[in-house]
């Protein structure tokens, strides 16, 4: 039996180290590091060694996730290596230490490999003079755009100007002029005068996005970044170039001139547009979201995210959001209610319903904690519960064809199926086996010695949404008369006609859809940006997200009112905080056992899966 | 009276000498190759087998031949860096980009004696187990490319090239690749990028040393046209004999191109170190025009540091008894070899000597040189990209009477921010050295132009 886990505890091969000194402090650094593109071991570079030593070498063109270009020359450092005698052995000082021969020429830290005994100097007067020189050259033809430049506040030219810049220009000649406001594609505008020609964007789009779309034309100081003539720069990852552009040359049409970055509050979150769950930062100010930018998580999205996910935030501020609790009165009119009234109403309807006459459809866009509460309620009420699949186009990089951010969470809660779980082994699944095979043929959750909830076992081989036809049938036959829907348009899954046959339709949603007007009880929910919670992404990584903005009107986080609903229906009190709820869920759900809210950290945690070898 | 020593140029200017194969063969062409490919393996004293190829490499190393492209790196040492065990193909590139201002020697060979280059290349290819070689020729040499292609076809149909060369079992193909007109394509890694179909952006070293990660990331030898021709003569004479020519540290002959304000500009093949700058200028190039005095000499192509008339240099000289003596020499008595020019603070570079007499305006000369470099900088790395144009703008302004007193020192400061290993390729030095040396040596001329300006801030120049 081979154990494959998503935890970061997989055995790390022993790395050989070598000793270098950074500004006089000796440290051991790995001889090799993984190449950012191929993953192959390549010699550790000076800049990486300095990073390990906690010394940041100023740089523009270097980016840890891209191929090295070495063109900006900002990272030039001085260095020395042990002097070798004619016998190729190090010459020793009287005190036994090796004699260091200082190199007469500087080296770029981003590309120069370290060697044993190397001394790197990053703060000598000569090094600082070189930085001042490079900075002066970079600013020589740079426009004075800072007051209107979107990069202002997060611009590396500004940043280093503080340290290495000069107060006055020494040039009296006119600057080189280049195109401004170049429309590169549907989402990107380029200002060539601001471009420092670091080629980060070129390398990204060529090597990572696989579209050799950008390049430099002209030469010398007239060099100009441009896109392939006649072809817009329009693949689904273009906005990442705006992130990595160290200056304000590449700007996002969406964010341009919208907000000064220093006013933005940054909230750690994850993207909800597909099952990948790219980590991101929400930039917001005064309850308004201005942008998403990817947040580095090497186990999920590295430093990148797709354009469609990044721009999918506008709906959160839509004016037609559901903002009121509403209950249908005896005359069939919707009436506004307070939360306690609405919860009472919903609980009353659920309690009166005959056992077996209730069904739940909870979206796989709801959080693990919310789905956990729904599962609990469904189990108590003897109700069927399921989610709905949501598929679209995927690609070979980040975008998953599964558009549910919490599909795996829903699968774990409502009916585990093998295909929902990340199978990280190439072994073929075994035939359907014993009862402790919780997840489906050949796949078993780790720590399987522990008891598992019956509902999971019962649903072992089903996919999410597999129960929807059964629910439809139940409604059609008049057996199911109460339906609770969270975050889905039930007309799409069951058909509008069937919904008309229900006695109770209890709905929570964020935006109006074809189902919401039919609700008997309507509870306004929250976008992820308005609450905290966790999703389990396609690879089995549980990731949490935090609250960036306030929900509109009466809208409340679903987990909050679901706790109230559970109490009103069953009398049980679940934890009222997301932390408490998560920890309770983890205890009661085999897949999440051993994981805590605190343990998720910023980068999430993988759930362990064991794959049986046949 | 100094004399030329024609080895490479031996035949090509003789009346009736033509660039076709038949003429080359009549003058003993491809005989060296024939001998080389039939060299039998021998056992060395320690029992190892030394193949014919090993032998050629040894001879080239023994000859001490330095590259003639600019850097003057020993050819045999360069070949020694090639990894024969990598399993990758090894490429050879003949660098015929000849773009350094003042240099016009490779073109003589290409135009008048292309088979000599081919024989040198085939020898170098054979010695280094190369199966595919390229001649990268500057775009402007259209006629040269045509002649080379004709020579290649002739060589191919006479079994000097192609499969099973001269029945030796050795296969080699050579292709001519034309550049599109950029100086930077002569820099070996820029050349390789260009050959791969990309912009000629020089590569960073490390890791992209041509001998390890060259053309298509395979071990690659880049040699200048003249160097490759010299290989033929090394093999004709034997490495030890060749090493006796020229000076001990810089053996052999080289073709010097003398241009500028001399009566008889042209190319002259000399025994290295056996001819002084003065002899080159006065004996070979006909001397200065009437009533003119020497002002300066650029001794190794426009990127070499300028030497001023009347400058004295200290040369170390080892006597026959092994004693080292220091000898002070005047500019004109400086022997033309790598060591002496280095001692004078400059270099032989591409072998181009540019002579300036006292009618030359050094500010104008430097402005001209700088404009060239600002135009030719590939623009990849910051100091060279921005610095080269900045220096050019200042020099143009100085030259047009709108200079400032501080411009001279500004120029030196800017150049200092470029040179000294701060750039990706040696172009950085190539554009900074002339500025550094001209301003240092002719400070008065620059300051005079700066002071001539009206005191108020000058109007900015259009880029
Ligand atoms: C900016 C620059 C331009 C160069 N141009 C040429 C050239 O036109 N022809 C040439 O043979 N070498 C040129 N070189 C030198 C080549 O990089 C390389 O050193 C040379 O071709 C090696 O040949 P060699 O060892 O036979 O001299 C240039 C170097 C630099 C830095
Ligand atoms: S646009 Fe930005 S990322 Fe691209 S080369 Fe210019 S400065 Fe670098
Ligand atoms: S790949 Fe998926 S998770 Fe990542 S940004 Fe795009 S839609 Fe969002
Ligand atoms: S030094 Fe100049 S020519 Fe060489 S790579 Fe840098 S910008 Fe290009
Ligand atoms: S960061 Fe090293 S050269 Fe740009």
Image: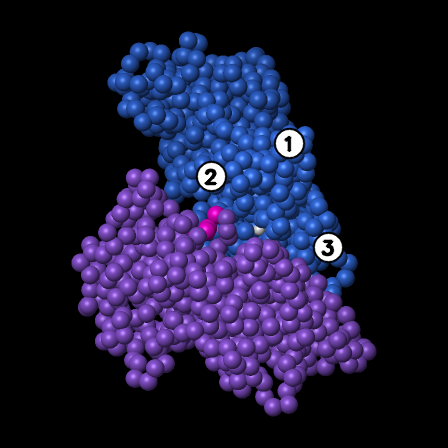
Chain colours: A blue, B purple
| Number of residues whose C-alpha sits closer than 10 Å to that of mark 2, classed few (under 14), some (14–19) or many (20 or more) | some
- Name the residue carrying label 3: A165
Q: Are marks 1 and 3 on the same chain?
A: yes
**Sequence-earlier tag: 2 or 3:** 2
Q: Residue A18, image x and y in percent?
A: 55, 32
Q: Decide if residue B127 is on the left or right side of residue B442.
A: left
Q: Are marks 1 and 2 on the same chain?
A: yes
Reply above or below: A529 against B157.
Answer: above
The magenta region covers B207-211
Question: Disc 1 or disc 3, which is closer to the eye?
Answer: 1
Name which residue lies at 48% across and 55% down.
B203
**Sequence-earlier tag: 1 or 3:** 1
Which quadrant, please, contains the C terminus of chain A?
Answer: top left
The image quadrant that residue A46 belongs to is: top right
- Name the residue carrying label 1: A97
| Number of residues whose C-alpha sits closer than 10 Å to that of mark 1, classed few (under 14), some (14–19) or many (20 or more) | few
The chain that hosts pointer 2 is: A
How far apart marks 2 and 3 lie (CA) works out to: 34 Å
- Name the residue carrying label 2: A42
The chain that hosts pointer 3 is: A
Q: Decide if residue A433 is on the left or right side of residue A174.
A: left
How far apart marks 1 and 3 lie (CA) works out to: 38 Å
> Marks 2 and 3: CB-CB under 8 Å?
no
**Mark 2 vs ligand 5: CB under 8 Å?**
no
Which quadrant, please, contains the N terminus of chain A?
Answer: top left
Q: Secondary structure at mark 3?
A: loop
């Amino acid at each position: 039996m081979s154990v494959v886990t998503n935890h970061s505890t997989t055995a790390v091969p022993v790395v050989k180290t070598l000793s270098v000194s950074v500004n006089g402090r000796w440290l051991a650094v790995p001889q090799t590091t993984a190449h950012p593109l191929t993953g192959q071991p390549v010699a550790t570079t000076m800049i990486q060694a300095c990073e390990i030593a906690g010394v940041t070498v100023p740089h523009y063109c270097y980016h840890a996730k891209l191929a090295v270009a070495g063109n900006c020359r900002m990272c030039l450092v001085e260095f020395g290596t042990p002097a070798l005698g004619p016998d190729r052995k190090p010459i020793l000082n009287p005190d036994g230490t090796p004699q260091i021969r200082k190199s007469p020429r500087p080296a770029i830290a981003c590309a120069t490999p370290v060697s044993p005994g190397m001394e790197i100097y990053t703060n000598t007067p000569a090094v600082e003079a070189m930085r001042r020189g490079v900075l002066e050259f970079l600013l020589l033809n740079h426009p004075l755009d800072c007051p209107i430049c979107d990069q202002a506040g997060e611009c590396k030219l500004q940043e280093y100007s503080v340290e290495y810049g000069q107060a006055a220009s020494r040039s009296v000649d006119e600057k080189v002029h280049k195109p401004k406001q170049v429309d590169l594609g549907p989402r990107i505008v380029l200002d060539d005068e601001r471009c420092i020609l670091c080629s980060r964007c070129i390398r990204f789009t060529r090597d990572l996005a696989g579209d050799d779309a950008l390049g430099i034309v002209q030469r010398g100081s007239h060099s100009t970044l441009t896109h392939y003539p006649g072809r817009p720069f329009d693949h689904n990852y273009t906005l990442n170039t705006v992130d990595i552009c160290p200056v304000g040359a590449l700007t996002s049409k969406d964010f341009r001139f919208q907000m000064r970055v220093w006013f933005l509050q940054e909230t750690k979150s994850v993207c909800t547009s597909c099952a990948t769950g790219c980590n991101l930062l929400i930039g917001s100010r005064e309850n308004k979201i201005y942008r998403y930018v990817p947040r580095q998580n090497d186990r999920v999205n590295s430093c990148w995210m797709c354009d469609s996910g990044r721009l999918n935030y506008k709906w959160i501020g839509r004016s037609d959001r559901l903002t009121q609790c509403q209950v249908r009165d005896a005359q069939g009119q919707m009436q506004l209610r307070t939360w306690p009234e609405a919860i009472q109403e919903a609980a009353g309807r659920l309690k009166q319903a005959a056992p077996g006459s209730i069904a739940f459809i909870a979206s796989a866009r709801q959080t693990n904690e919310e789905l956990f509460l729904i599962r609990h309620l469904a189990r108590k009420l003897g109700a069927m519960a399921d989610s709905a699949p949501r598929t679209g186009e995927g690609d070979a990089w980040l975008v998953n064809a599964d558009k549910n951010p919490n599909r795996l969470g829903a699968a774990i809660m409502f009916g585990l199926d093998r295909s929902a779980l990340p199978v990280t082994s190439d072994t073929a699944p075994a035939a359907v086996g014993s009862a402790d095979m919780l997840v489906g043929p050949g796949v078993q959750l780790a720590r399987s010695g522990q008891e598992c909830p019956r509902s999971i076992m019962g649903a072992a081989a089903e996919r999410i949404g597999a129960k929807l036809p059964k629910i439809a049938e139940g409604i059609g036959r008049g057996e199911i008369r109460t339906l609770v829907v969270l975050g889905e348009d039930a007309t799409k899954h069951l058909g509008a006609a069937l919904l008309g046959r229900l006695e109770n339709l209890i709905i929570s949603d964020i935006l109006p859809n074809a189902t919401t007007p039919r609700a008997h009880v309507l509870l306004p929910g929250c976008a992820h940006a308005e609450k905290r919670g966790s999703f389990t992404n396609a690879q089995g990584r549980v990731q949490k997200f935090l609250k960036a903005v306030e929900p509109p009107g009466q809208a409340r986080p679903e987990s909050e009112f679901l706790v109230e609903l559970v109490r009103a229906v069953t009398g049980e009190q679940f934890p009222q905080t997301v932390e408490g709820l998560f920890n309770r869920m983890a205890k009661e759900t085999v897949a999440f056992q051993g994981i805590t809210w605190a343990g998720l950290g910023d980068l999430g945690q993988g759930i362990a899966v064991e794959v049986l070898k046949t | 009276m100094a004399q030329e020593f024609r080895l490479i140029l031996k035949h090509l200017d003789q009346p009736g000498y033509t660039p076709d194969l038949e003429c080359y063969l009549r003058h003993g062409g491809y005989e060296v190759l024939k001998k080389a490919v039939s060299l039998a393996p021998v056992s060395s004293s320690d029992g190892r087998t030394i193949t014919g190829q090993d032998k050629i490499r040894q001879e080239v190393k023994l000859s001490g031949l330095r590259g003639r492209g600019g850097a003057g790196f020993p050819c045999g040492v360069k070949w020694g860096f090639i990894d024969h065990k990598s399993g990758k193909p090894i490429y050879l590139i003949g660098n015929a980009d000849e773009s350094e201002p003042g240099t016009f020697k490779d073109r003589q060979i290409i135009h008048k004696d292309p088979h000599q280059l081919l024989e040198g290349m085939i020898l170098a290819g054979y010695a280094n187990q190369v199966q595919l070689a390229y001649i990268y020729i500057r775009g402007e040499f259209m006629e040269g490319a045509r002649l080379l292609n004709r020579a290649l076809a002739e060589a191919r149909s006479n079994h000097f090239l192609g499969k099973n060369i001269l029945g030796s079992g050795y296969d080699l193909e050579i292709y001519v690749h034309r550049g599109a007109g950029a100086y930077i394509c002569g820099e070996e890694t820029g050349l390789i990028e260009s050959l791969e179909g990309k912009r000629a952006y020089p590569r960073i070293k490390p890791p992209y040393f041509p001998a390890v990660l060259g053309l298509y990331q395979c071990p690659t030898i880049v040699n200048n046209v003249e160097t490759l021709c010299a290989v033929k003569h090394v093999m004709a004479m034997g490495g030890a004999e060749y090493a006796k020519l020229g000076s001990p540290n810089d053996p052999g002959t080289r073709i010097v191109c003398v241009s500028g304000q001399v009566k008889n500009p042209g190319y002259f093949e000399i025994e290295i170190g056996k001819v002084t700058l003065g002899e080159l200028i006065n004996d070979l190039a006909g001397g200065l025009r009437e009533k003119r005095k020497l002002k300066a000499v650029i001794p190794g192509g426009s990127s070499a540091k300028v030497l001023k008339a009347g400058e004295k240099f200290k040369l170390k000289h080892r006597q026959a008894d092994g004693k080292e003596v220091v000898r002070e020499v005047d500019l004109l008595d400086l022997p033309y070899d790598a060591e002496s020019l280095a001692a004078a603070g400059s270099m032989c570079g591409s072998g181009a000597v540019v002579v300036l007499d006292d009618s030359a305006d050094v500010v104008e000369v430097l402005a001209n040189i700088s404009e060239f470099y600002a135009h030719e900088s590939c623009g990849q790395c910051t100091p060279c990209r921005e610095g080269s144009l900045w220096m050019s703008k200042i020099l143009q302004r100085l030259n047009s009477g709108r200079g400032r007193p501080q411009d001279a020192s500004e120029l030196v400061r800017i150049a200092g921010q470029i040179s000294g290993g701060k750039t990706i390729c040696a172009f950085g030095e190539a554009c900074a050295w002339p500025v550094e040396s001209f301003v240092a040596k002719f400070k008065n001329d620059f300051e005079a132009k700066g002071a001539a300006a009206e005191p108020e801030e000058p109007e900015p120049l259009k880029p």
